[in-house]
Amino acid sequence: MNTGYSGGIPDEVIEAVLQHNDIVDTVGKYVHLTKQGKYMKGLCPFHSEKTPSFTVTPERQIFYCYGCGAGGNAIKFRMEIDGLTFPEAVRLMAEESHVPFQDGKGAAATPQNKELERLLQAHEWAAKLFHYLLKNTEHGKAAMEYLRARGFGDKLIDQFQIGYAPDRWDTLVQFFEKRSFDLKEMEKGGLLSPRQNGSGYVDRFRGRVMFPIMNRSGRVIAFAGRILGEGQPKYLNSPESRLFNKSRTLYNLNLAKGPIRKQGQIVLMEGFGDVIAAWDAGVQHTVATMGTALTENHASLIRTLTEEVVVCYDGDNAGQAAALKSIPILEGAGLHVKIAVLQNGLDPDEYIKTYGQERFVDQIIHGAVSTTKFRLIYTKKNYNLLEEDGKAAYAQEAINVIAHLTSPTEREVYLKELSTEVGVSLESLKQDCNLARQTLNRKQPPSGQQGNRNGNNGNARGSRKQPTAPTLLPAYHVAERRLLSIMLQDGEAATHVAQQLGDAFNIPEHAALAAYIYSYYAQGKAPDISRFIASLHDDRLEKTATSISMMDAPLDETLRGMDDYIREIKKFPLQKQIEQKREDMLRAEKSGDFLRAAQIASEIITLERQ
């Protein structure tokens, strides 16, 4: 995404934003990072991967992905992760860190970005209006009684900005008209619907308790409305829009990011009420898929935050079936999966009300079982174990589940439990399990990913592709990268290169970077790769600069060492000339023009001496 320019934002504002937004804190809100030496590592949020190649360097305040090449400073990260232009990212980060923000005379934002900002504003205003109507008007009285009956106190209502949309056709229509919002845009954003006769608009949400849905930055991007009383649909969500993609959005992620990092785990639920009840019970690393089916995009998003997920769906048949379906999706993303088992068909909200917060935490969340154990529990429900036929059929299906485990110890643990349940000797069950494994091995390739200690796909965190051999760069290319790496770290070195080489780099991107480096130091600035990147405003150059800065070229390189690089760079054009002249000489000899061939040979000798 080449978003271009600084928008006229003064350098001091950009530098203040970078100073107040540490790269580890900025990235850590979106990516689960672990320390490895002087770097922080995690799964790249910009492409799908199971082995971390995403690197954050606190010392230099930059990030770089060795997998997809994404890289830059904290501002660049927010641009990419939130889909913002440079000015939008700086403005947002300035507001978040209370840095005084002022625009220069840069070009105006594109109409598309203006529309996006208006939609975000409209959603923020709508959320505030619904919240006000719930708490302060007669319209919201019935909705407030409903929420009180469900155990929602003022603190929770305020924290989750719950509101109420009156049972009228034009509450939002009038609200937006008074504030000069374009109603057509509001329809595109999912807040209004066209009238059936085609003239004008009506409110999409009417007579519903409103739950704002926020993006990871905490901005309202959609709503879910729960009908009061009877009626269908029970829940009405905003339609997909420029702001809202339900297969990529998790409810409460904006609040849960910190607790998820702290716990090293995420709890996945189905509904808003369940998440809010769990939050109130102290389980605050909880998100929900908002009633929609779990997708691979959801799983990939979760994997950027943590390695472990507890699936806590409703205890009824539909909820447990959904939990079963979620296992291969989550394991396919390389997650370690556990399943919380709720008894008597209760959902998490009902369980907390019935048995209390402490029991919910201890028995349901902390007591979550492995995926293999859950599959066995789920399978057992289909058989009558009081009958011999039921026991035999259950034992066979259970063996097929256990056979997928690669660890003999784990298989024996589950087979012992099964032996007790069905009254069959452990040895007999082992024999049947070995036969089942032989059948599996015949069906699958030798490298098949059968399952780790909890039945997860992959022997570790998912399959790993064979690494491809690194591309060997020409000597002049390596010399240019090393030289630029030293220049980025040392102003005097950059001055020496300017005098000896100037812009005579052979690769255009390197020549452009060198020009920017000369200009950067000419302004009296100290070496700082993060601030240097902020001065580029060009995707290709930012990625090149970030990649080069990861080389770790030692700063104690002598001028002699740098001169070797300079000579290598200057030598390349001469080598190309020599190669071309040798081809010309061969052609002259083949055509019988030996005088011309001799002249070219003399020119080659002169070039080789140079």
Image: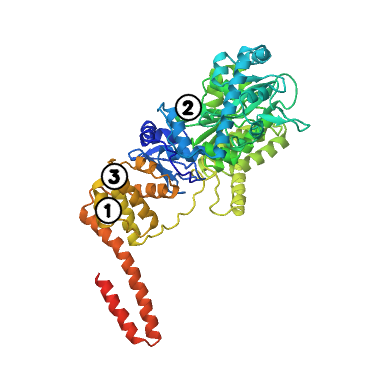
Q: Position of residue 295 (x, y in %)?
A: 61, 39
Crowding around mark 1 (Cα neighbors within 10 Å: few <14, some 14 to 19, many 20+) is: some
> What distance separates the C-alpha of mark 1 from that of mark 3?
11 Å
Amino acid on which the number 1 mark rests in the picture: Ala
Choose top left, top right, bottom left or bottom right for residue 503. bottom left
What numbered label is drawn on residue 259?
2
Can residue 471 be seen here? The reply is: yes
Q: Does label 3 or label 2 sit earlier along the sequence?
A: 2
Q: Does label 1 or label 3 sit earlier along the sequence?
A: 1
Choose top left, top right, bottom left or bottom right for residue 312. top right
- As drawn, 261 above or below 73: above
- Give the farthest residue toward the front: 105
> What distance separates the C-alpha of mark 3 from that of mark 2?
42 Å
Residue at position x 62%, y 30% in the image? 290
> What distance separates the C-alpha of mark 2 from that of mark 1?
50 Å
Asked which secondary structure carries label 3, the reply is helix
Q: Nearer the viewer, residue 539 or 43?
A: 539
